[in-house]
Amino acid sequence: MTISLEEVRHIAALARLGISDERARDLAVELSSILDHMQVLTRLETSPDDGDSQQERGMLLRRDTGPPIPLDRTVASIAPELRDGFFLVPRLATHEDSEPAP
Amino acid sequence: MSEPGLGVPEPLATVAEIRESVASGRRSPSEVVEKTFERARNVRAGGDGLNAFLWSDLRAAQDEAAALGRRVGSGDVGALAGVPLAIKDNIATLGSPTTCGSRILGDYHSPFEATAVRRLRAAGAIIIAKTNLDEFAMGSSTEFSAFGRTKHPLDPALVPGGSSGGSAAAVAAGITPAALGSETGGSVRQPAAFCGVVGVKPTYGRVSRFGLIAFASSLDQIGVFGATVSDAATVLHAIAGHDPNDSTSADLIVPEYGEAAASLEGVVIGRPAEYFPDQLDPHITAHCDRAFDHFRSLGAQIRDVSLPSTALAIPAYYIVAPAEASSNLARFDGVRYGMRVTDHGLRGMYEATRSKGFGPEVTRRILLGTYVLSAGYYDAYYAKAMAARAAIARDFANVFASGVNALFTPTTPTTAFAAGSKSDPYEMYLSDIFTVTANLAGIPSLSLPIGRVRGLPVGGQLLAPHFGEHGMFAIARALETSLGVEAHR
């Protein structure tokens, strides 16, 4: 299994990780080597039901709910930048993929 | 200057001894705290020595001890009254940082506390330190901490294992009788084996994950280190049980973990062939064989069994865990908390923050997880890994359904290895080869010392059915008692 440099750049962009060309080349080799060891799984016969059985893995089906979480400190004390209760981020218009604002 | 940890005396006392001395008034919680910090200084637990602690504050611990002294004086004596404990730094605490061993959370103070830590404090425990770990618990050596590696208490050139290496070192060096760690693929049991202490991974759902910073949510579980099986069992009992803040926590009664079984008459212990390959270090095999002899002498029946899907465990684990990590760690983007690095526009900020905030192993796993979840590869990798996971769980279910009460195996294929000796990531991953199966299947497991090879500890691993901690502890205590001092020879 070989992961190309272009694929490393693509998944790095998906994962929002900035990676230098040199590091990307190293990662292509490292990830290819790791995935070589995963090839044993490709020989595994699977059916549509495989992997879906939560109960079989000993886990509980549950509702994703819970009580409110009391905070000991305010959000403002941990946020990098907050104004009027909103998190501030750089302008979307400066996003490299965005069209310039008219 | 002497080497850290070397030549240190035996641990001060067990959990039960400390609790009894505080409850009876023979020692005050403040005296326990003084002794604990003296011990930490003597073994050089900090950054100039073992580097087991990322945070420790004598004044904060003294304040806790003073408050506890008033509680004890008024008759409120919890199950852990006065017991000093250390907490892995991926478990949220109030009054101290929670860094996850990462630059991206280097200055993070959680606004809430993990349920497990709240329960420890309610039982009278005193939190004396946050411990070092591989960044976001991704690693098997504690070399991937952004704050420097933790050293093995017996030899600073060696690793203590990981990812909970700081907690393992704290217990092994006799600073605290117990500590919290976390498990995703063996991060309590493997360092416990390397350091010669007891490490417990509970059943998935036995302990609330609320406040445990997520790595792989379907695998993560808070675990416990103890100098003895009883130490670990007492602490696990204090933190176990349902929590409305974690809907994966099981709403089941937590039984008292009781005394050692005087006899194992009628108990069937399985010896899975796949955990004893021909290439296993013969010294480790010999120590396991000696443990099986002890089981027999206690009245247990040893049965050869097979878990045929075991060979799929490492490949399956290193697809499932990175896949979940790539999703869980997306939240660290410089927007709501943690480090922010500004660069060109919004995407520039995301990429600069994450590339400077995450270290090499976390970056590698995020990319691996993103790859196996991406279009075109999901069926080839993730779907296959989930099928393998189901097959591994079926193997365990079949063996336990056949009348086997518990399985016994080596915890690790080697003893503690030298720092810097595993530069190939997959070679490091193989360190977890005997531990990841319990996480994939969600079953409880425990490592305890069963001997030494060339002076280094060897761990023996028990694996039990879901929520079978009670029986697992009874067998472990029986073996611990039967081995006696042989466990450290």
Image: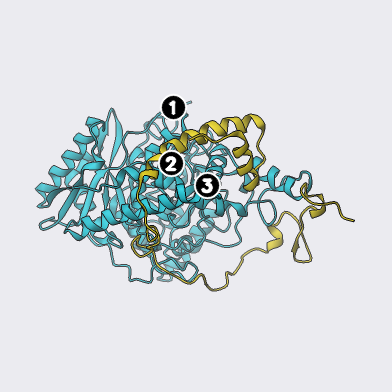
Chain colours: A yellow, B cyan
Residue B263 drawn at (x, y percent) = 12, 56
Residue at 40 percent across and 35 percent down: it is B153
Please say if the residues under marks 3 and 1 sit with CB atoms less than 8 Å apart: no
Please state, as top left, top right, bottom left or bottom right, where the C terminus of chain B lies in the image.
top left
Q: Foreground mark, 3 or 2?
A: 3
Q: CA distance from mark 3 to mark 2?
A: 21 Å
Residue B442 drawn at (x, y percent) = 36, 57
Residue at 29 percent across and 67 percent down: it is B255
* Mark found first going from the N terminus, 3 or 1: 3
Q: Quadrant of residue A68?
A: bottom right
Please name whichever residue, B131 or B135, is drawn nearer the observer in this view of the structure. Answer: B135
Residue B427 drawn at (x, y percent) = 41, 33
**Residue A75 shows in the view:** yes
Specify the subunit that label 2 lies on. B
Q: Amino acid at mark 1?
A: Ser
From the image, tell me which residue sits under label 3.
Answer: B369
From the image, tell me which residue sits under label 1.
Answer: B421
Helix, strand or loop at label 1? It is loop
Residue B232 drawn at (x, y percent) = 33, 54
Q: CA distance from mark 1 to mark 2?
A: 14 Å
* Mark found first going from the N terminus, 3 or 2: 2
From the image, tell me which residue sits under label 2.
Answer: B162
In the rendered image, the vertical position of residue B396 relative to residue B194, given as above or below:
below
- Labels 1 and 2 in the same subunit: yes
Please name whichever residue, A56 or B332, is drawn nearer the observer in this view of the structure. Answer: A56
Crowding around mark 3 (Cα neighbors within 10 Å: few <14, some 14 to 19, many 20+) is: many
Disc marking residue B275: none
